[in-house]
Amino acid sequence: EPEVTQTPSHQVTQMGQEVILRCVPISNHLYFYWYRQILGQKVEFLVSFYNNEISEKSEIFDDQFSVERPDGSNFTLKIRSTKLEDSAMYFCASSPRESYNEQFFGPGTRLTVL
Amino acid sequence: AQTVTQSQPEMSVQEAETVTLSCTYDTSESDYYLFWYKQPPSRQMILVIRQEAYKQQNATENRFSVNFQKAAKSFSLKISDSQLGDAAMYFCAYRSAFTGANSKLTFGKGITLSVRP
């Protein structure tokens, strides 16, 4: 069964460094998302992406964040200058064309900012 | 803006018994989707069940069923014959139908379910 994959599973970085989190959505899906979950808290929406552009972004998704689909398979989230409060689990999700369908989540990348 | 509330932070159930997890939401929209996601210790988010707001009939998936009360904006999850593998964090989530497939999920804070052998 096709699944969303994410790499790395765990990323440790120093405050102020840039990180790129990678996701490979399910191949025939058209809509892509990033969510984050700070430890012990709820899952929060960051950004949605369709047709090579951002569809919606939350207030969390400030100028330090960017997303890209550099080729036909990868979907990346870049944090330009990480802060301590960026430490969280980051989930990528994808969804097919039909609006009623679920979003399929990847296993997440745990980001630790020291 | 839509909000999802899960007021119980933790629940416990005896193996083979039935447990109900509560969720309420607030929206001004008439058409939307509601979901329950399971997050085991591995942290992977797994869809448990989905309900479409325009459908009167409550969704069921094997041992999982929902009690969807649209007027009360309530969406509870019932787990029958609980198994040890059901132990996880459960999130209730809302998704608008009006913005189409691109619509974000809004999650509640989650509830930690433990299953006693």
Image: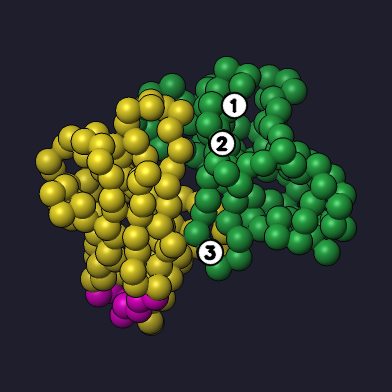
**Is residue A22 in sight in this rendering?**
no
Residue B18, quarter of the rendered image? bottom left
Q: Residues within 10 Å of mark 2 (few under 14, many from 20)?
A: some
Q: Magenta region, mostly helix, strand or loop?
A: strand
CB under 8 Å between discs 2 and 1: yes
Residue B19, position as x, y percentages in the image? 26, 70
Q: Is residue B34 left or right of residue A46?
A: left
Of the residues shown, which amino acid type is indicated by label 3? Gln
Colour chosen for chain A:
green
Badge 1 density bin: few <14, some 14–19, many ≥20, Cα 10 Å:
some
Q: Is residue B92 above or below residue A71?
A: below
First along the sequence among labels 3 and 2: 3
Q: Which residue is mark 1?
A: A54
Q: Which residue bears the numbered disc 2?
A: A57
**Where residue A29 appears, x then y in whole percent?**
52, 25
Residue at image location 42% in from the left, 47% down from the top: B106
**Mark 1 residue type:** Ile
